Image (cartoon, rainbow, N blue to C red):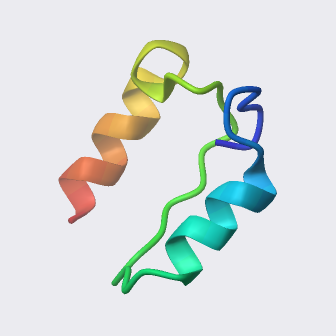
Amino acid sequence: MLQDRAIAPRIQKMMYTENQCEKVFTIDGSHSPFFSKPDEVADHLSSI
């Protein structure tokens, strides 16, 4: 979440690069993307 004020994007990147993530999605939204960008979250989930 690029506009996350709870967990900075650089910390998010550290978390997903230190773990084995098969795919990472970026959403230009807040800490709660299911509220700020629900359609985009649904699209990403549908694509998995």
Q: Choose top left, top right, bottom left or bottom right for residue 15.
A: bottom right
Q: Quadrant of the N terminus?
A: top right
Q: Total of numbered circles in the picture?
A: 0
Q: Nearer the viewer, residue 30 or 10?
A: 10
| Location of residue 10 with respect to 21 vertically, above or below | above
Residue 21, how many percent across, how many down?
A: 38, 80
In the rendered image, residue 30, in percent from the top left (x then y), is placed at: 65, 25
Q: Residue at x 79, y 60 (%)?
A: 10
Residue 41 vs 10, above or below: the answer is above
Compared with residue 13, is residue 40 higher up or lower down, i.e. above or below? above
44 vs 4, left or right, is left
| Residue 12 spot, x, y in % from top left | 63, 57
Left or right, 32 with reference to 42? right
Towards the viewer: 15 or 42:
15
- Residue 23 image point, x, y percent: 39, 77
* Occupied quadrant, residue 31: top right
21 to the left or right of 27: left
**Residue at the (55%, 16%) spot, across then down:** 36
Q: Residue furthest top?
A: 35
The residue nearer to you, when weighing 9 against 47, is 9
Query: What quarter of the picture does the C terminus occupy?
Result: bottom left
The quadrant where residue 5 appears: top right
**What's the residue at 37%, 86% (across, down)?**
20
Q: Residue at x 33, y 44 (%)?
A: 43
